[in-house]
Image (tube, rainbow, N blue to C red):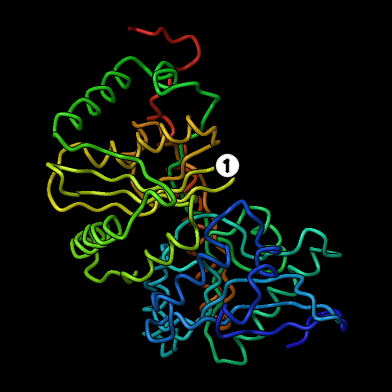
Amino acid sequence: MSADDASLTLKAVSRIAAVDPAAWDACAGADNPFVSHAFLSALEDSRSASGEEGWQPQHLVLEDAAGRVLAVAPLYLKSHSYGEYVFDWAWANAYAQAGGRYYPKLQCAVPFTPVTGPRLMVRPDAPDPALLRRALVGGMVDLAERLGCSSVHVTFPTEPEVGEMEDMGLLVRLGTQYHWENRGYASFDEFLATLASRKRKDIRKEREKAQATGVRLHTLTGAEITPRHWDAFYRFYQATSDRKWGNPYLTRAFFDLLGERLGDRVVLVTGEDDGRLVCGALNLRGADCLYGRNWGSLGEYRFLHFEACYYRAIDYAIEHGLARVEAGAQGEHKIKRGYLPTPTWSAHWIADPGLRAAVARFLRQERAAMEAEMEDLAEFAPYRRCGEGDGG
């Protein structure tokens, strides 16, 4: 593939191992752990993201005439829509009913990871970064046409990237998640003091009830996390996957590689009952954010999920001066615990004009509904409004 500039060369590689880790990370930056070479290679090397699982890597690498990597994009050839968290099953079904073939498609994303982060990743010292990002998107479309793909989907990109892709003619989709913002709190109690009295009391009761289960929670990171912890967490992960969607995406080997390659960026909250590990919540730490990823348990412990996933994450963010906690996809129940609706985005190129027109109409209607829903949900925020008394 050739980029717009004759001095640039764009290629697709079938293994991220084919890209020098330092060159990839120079483009990806250090803020978001999920787009790092370490995380993406852990997915591939553990066979969690592979062609056999319907995630065939086709990562784009843009080089200058000297062979220096200027820009990269995590890209996969998909034979299904599992593990994406931006649901297009209805589009696939409608196209199939009209006689079309929706799969394969191209997915620019981090597999199994609904976390906003850069997707069109350019070295900070590269010339004309806007040109390079356009070249990456153009390369995705070119590759899709050559491979006979129905579409290209860029999921959970940053808002500036979405704006650029919309200017290039891609369709934009609005979603929502629930994030907690650190307003410079010195302690969890200081955070609670900003809430309405009833909401504050509810959270205190939930934490007390979680403690009353007798499960002792520990927050571990880096070398503190041993194979024993990963063995147990994988059991929790499998149990939760069986209950929710029936097929765990991540292999046991992935968690070992995650611990080895991400080190102190891995934050694992574990729960012990009588010396036996019974639950866990997996987080990854970015430059200014704690990202909640997976939760699992081997029993029903009331309120323990809220404590391990939401309140311990807030504790950690406050202690380490992180700006926010992103607690993963979905979950309106997070609002009353201080996690507020936050927009997420995706961008879509669709080859067939008829399907494209139908999807464009749907997205316009969906966006209006999403914006109204987010506005309504914000009214349920637990924070005290201006002029509202404390109430004790």
Q: Residue at x 81, y 68 (%)?
A: 131
Percent position of residue 62, x then y: 74, 77
36 relative position to 372: left or right: right
Specify the quadrant of the image occupied by residue 184: top right
Residue 173: image x %, image y %?
Answer: 53, 60
Q: Determine the image quadrant of residue 380.
A: top left
Q: Secondary structure at mark 1?
A: loop
Residue 340 figure quarter: top left
Q: Which corner quadrant holds the N terminus?
A: bottom right
Side (left or right) of 142 relative to 39: right
Within-10-Å neighbours for mark 1: few <14, some 14–19, many 20+: some
Number of callouts in the render?
A: 1
Q: Percent x, y for residue 247?
A: 25, 71
Front one among 107 and 72? 72
Which of 31 and 46 lies nearest the eye of the viewer? 46
Relative depth, front residue between 128 and 176: 128
> Which residue has dot 1 on it?
288
Left or right of 212? Residue 165 is right
Q: Whole-percent x and y of residue 346?
A: 54, 61
> Which amino acid, mark 1?
Asp
Write the residue at 34% across / 31% down.
336
Which residue sits at x=48%, y=9%?
A: 387
Say if 37 sits above or below 101 in the image: above
